[in-house]
Image (tube, rainbow, N blue to C red):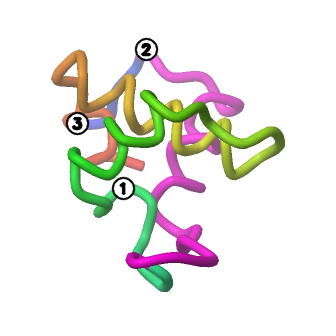
Amino acid sequence: MENVYLDDYNRSILKSLKTFQMPFGKYKGWFIYKLPESYLVWFNQKGFADGKLGAMLQTMYEIRLNGLEYLLKDV
């Protein structure tokens, strides 16, 4: 069942979480949506980077924090 609450812009953001890979560090090559919660919490404590990568990591952190992983299933 498609999530009718997502517009095209928000759907594209969620799609990027499933297709963009972490470019560096311990989890280099992992898709953003598969990063461990502990790694996202660490970034939240240290500060997210500026730019697209930081925004994606922060979005994924908020999705996990609020139990919204179901949003990623239909994109």
Q: Which mark is residue 5?
A: 2
Q: Locate residue 67 relative to residue 31 in the image: left or right.
A: left
Q: Are marks 2 and 1 in contact (CB under 8 Å)?
A: no
Query: In the rendered structure, does residue 24 fall within the stretch colored magenta?
Result: yes
State how far apart marks 2 and 1 are (Cα). Answer: 20 Å
Q: Residue furthest right?
A: 51
How dense is the environment of label 3, judged by Cα within 10 Å: few (below 14), some, or many (20 and up)?
Answer: few
- Estimate the x, y position of residue 45 in percent, counting from the top left: 43, 28
Q: Tell me the element at label 1.
A: helix
State how far apart marks 3 and 2 are (Cα). Answer: 15 Å
Q: Nearer the viewer, residue 1 or 61?
A: 61
Q: Nearer the viewer, residue 71 or 40?
A: 40
**Which is nearer the N-term, disc 2 or disc 1?**
2
Q: Tell me the element at label 3.
A: helix
Quarter of the image where one finds residue 72: top left
State how far apart marks 3 and 1 are (Cα). Answer: 9 Å
How dense is the environment of label 1, judged by Cα within 10 Å: few (below 14), some, or many (20 and up)?
Answer: many
Residue type for callout 3:
Glu
Q: Locate residue 36 relative to residue 45 in the image: left or right.
A: left
Q: Are marks 3 and 1 in contact (CB under 8 Å)?
A: no
Q: Locate residue 75 relative to residue 41 in the image: left or right.
A: right
Up-down relation of residue 44 to residue 56 (above or below): above
Q: Which mark is residue 69?
A: 3
- Estimate the x, y position of residue 67 in percent, counting from the top left: 16, 23
- At a point 23% along the width and 56% down the height, the residue shown is 36
Check disc 1 and report the residue beneath it.
33
Query: In the rendered structure, does residue 57 fall within the stretch colored magenta?
Result: no
**Which is nearer the N-term, disc 3 or disc 2?**
2
Residue extent of the magenta highlight: 5-27
Residue type for callout 1:
Tyr
